[in-house]
Image: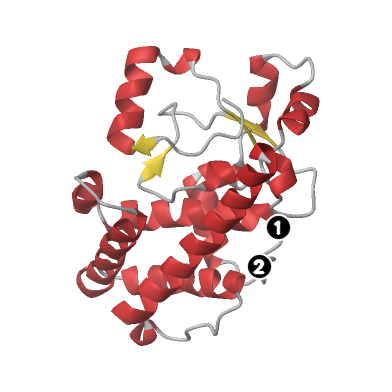
């Protein structure tokens, strides 16, 4: 696939990868293409494990044009699958995600890496809260915003029940707020259910809008 969205929840991706074989799945995606960024976790890409064939950003920001198949054709050119595998994104490394959350560098919302880091950070946070708590995310669902509500519940649980989790959730939410141009919360106490829900909804809306614009460019 080239620039494909995430096809299903993690159990689906794992089963699919097991049946087809990780070595037989070739997923190519531009760093600045918004379509592969949606929907947010717990939707994931196959293969699992693996990060697909990542093409580093050549543009200045998340771009609908990056979803164009002509751009993919040009980027891939005559490269082999092993050659494309040489560009694994840093945000797939857990230690790097932790350093991203600790960093005080101001985020650039126009940079496609910002959204990739935020997505990787969400997954890192949820795993840190505990794999068993991810079960509600893997069950039946009725829409992306229902998933957001469940993620909010998990974040609140982590802040209330797990030592030192509040500081990680605060760092994560501060970075999202900054990237979205919102007023940034200064303390974990400010992260009410209402605020967490509003910020994550806004994040989903923005990422989905960029992806829809990219798809319309292709269809049109």
* Colouring mode (rainbow / by chain / secondary structure / one colour): secondary structure
* Residue 194 image label: none
Residue at image point 38% right, 58% down:
125
Residue at image point 73% right, 55% down:
61
Around disc 2, counting alpha carbons within 10 Å, would you say few (fewer than 14), some (14 to 19), or many (20 or more)? some
Residue at image point 25% right, 50% down:
137
Q: Which SS class for mark 2?
A: loop
Around disc 1, counting alpha carbons within 10 Å, would you say few (fewer than 14), some (14 to 19), or many (20 or more)? some
Residue 205: give x, y in percent of width and height: 50, 63
The residue wearing badge 2 is: 107
The residue wearing badge 1 is: 111
- Is 10 located above or below residue 200 in the figure? above
The residues bearing labels 1 and 2 have C-alpha atoms spaced at a distance of 8 Å
Q: Residue furthest front?
A: 220
| Relative horizontal placement of residue 161, taking residue 191 as reference (left or right) | left
Residue at image point 53% right, 66% down:
102
- Is 79 located above or below residue 61 in the figure? above
Q: Of the residues tagged 1 and 2, which is closer to the observer?
A: 1
Residue 208: give x, y in percent of width and height: 52, 55
Q: Which SS class for mark 1?
A: loop
Q: Quadrant of the C terminus?
A: top right
Residue 23: give x, y in percent of width and height: 48, 14
Q: Are marks 1 and 2 in contact (CB under 8 Å)?
A: yes
| Relative horizontal placement of residue 132, taking residue 69 as reference (left or right) | left
Q: Quadrant of residue 155?
A: bottom left
């Amino acid at each position: 696939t080239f620039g494909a969205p995430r096809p299903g929840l993690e159990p689906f991706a794992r089963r699919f990868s097991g049946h087809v074989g990780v070595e037989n799945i070739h997923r190519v995606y531009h760093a600045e293409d918004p379509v592969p960024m949606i929907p947010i976790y717990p939707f994931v890409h196959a293969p699992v494990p693996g990060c697909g064939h990542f093409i580093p950003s050549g543009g200045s920001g998340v771009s609908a044009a990056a979803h164009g198949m002509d751009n993919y054709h040009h980027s891939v050119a005559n490269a082999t699958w092993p050659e494309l595998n040489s560009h694994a994104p840093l945000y797939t490394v857990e230690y790097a995600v932790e350093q991203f959350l600790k960093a005080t560098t101001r985020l650039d919302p126009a940079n496609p890496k910002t959204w990739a880091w935020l997505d990787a950070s969400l997954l890192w946070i949820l795993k840190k809260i505990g794999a068993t708590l991810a079960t509600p995310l893997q069950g039946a669902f009725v829409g992306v915003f229902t998933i957001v509500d469940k993620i909010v519940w998990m974040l609140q649980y982590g802040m209330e029940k797990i030592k030192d989790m509040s500081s990680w959730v605060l760092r994560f939410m501060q970075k999202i707020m900054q990237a979205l141009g919102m007023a940034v919360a200064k303390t974990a106490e400010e992260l009410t259910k209402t605020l967490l829900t509003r910020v994550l909804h806004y994040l989903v809306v923005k990422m989905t809008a960029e992806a829809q614009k990219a798809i319309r460019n292709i269809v049109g």
